Amino acid sequence: MSGPAADPRLEGRTLRRVVYDASQIAARVRELGAQITAAYPEGDLLVLGLLKGSFIFLSDLVREINRPLQIDFLVASSYADSTISSGDVRLLYDPHTRLEGRHILLVEDIVDTGRTLNRLMHLLRARNPRSLEICALLHKHLAKALEHETKFVGFDAPHEYLVGYGLDHAESFRHIPYIASLL
Ligand code: IMP
Ligand code: MG
């Protein structure tokens, strides 16, 4: 038997369902890339990936953005080995990259409560970027107190815990090339 239910990458876990398959993701990432290309007609663009969850999304996305850009990363953590957001956002690495006067596009895997982004946007805005926007592959639209609208959204995600394409559960399943929920 083949198919995602028998995927050897799942550590014996069973899929509930595949939510977005690899070709759906690729098509949407292409559209986002075109949208971002058109949104920045001029200026210095820094794509700032939030590790670790955005690493696969960012690597595909930047190859669909047809203009000059630079890339850097931030690490902020709000989830430990659980699937519950603790709300305790820790900034583990802060790039020395100059943000002042540049267009900053913060790339996030998924917006859940929005706490991570609220805190980060505050920190980044203090550095006087020319503009500051968010691109999230997935948005659960659960955030009650999101201070900044997510300008670029890949998919409106279902309210299930999702893994794959960078998203983890206790650091596993990030390498699965599709996005799924587990039983
Ligand atoms: P927030 O601060 O509650 O918005 O949490 C955002 C972070 O929580 C994301 O960057 C993910 O790392 C993680 N997260 C939220 N929902 C999921 C999910 O369904 N699967 C995997 N990680 C998630
Ligand atoms: Mg995570």
Image (cartoon, grey):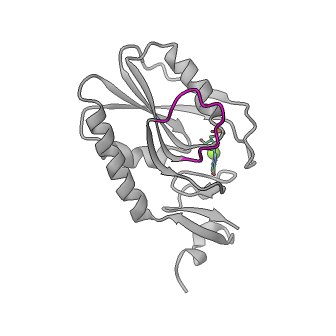
Q: Which residues are magenta?
A: 139-150
Residue at 64%, 43% in the rendered image: 142
Q: Is residue 34 magenta?
A: no
**Residue 62: x, y in percent?**
34, 42
Q: Quadrant of ligand 1?
A: top right
Q: Is residue 149 magenta?
A: yes
Residue 72 sits in which quadrant? top left
| Location of the N terminus (image quadrant) | bottom right
Residue at 27%, 22% in the rendered image: 43
* Magenta segment, prevailing SS (helix, strand or loop): loop
**Residue 169: x, y in percent?**
67, 54
Figure check: 72 above or below 141: above
Residue at 52%, 13% in the rendered image: 126
**Residue 33: x, y in percent?**
32, 44
Residue at 62%, 32% in the rendered image: 116
Task: Give the side of residue 27 with respect to residue 68, left or right.
Answer: right
Q: Between 37 and 45, which is closer to the camera in this rendering? A: 37
Figure check: 109 above or below 13: above
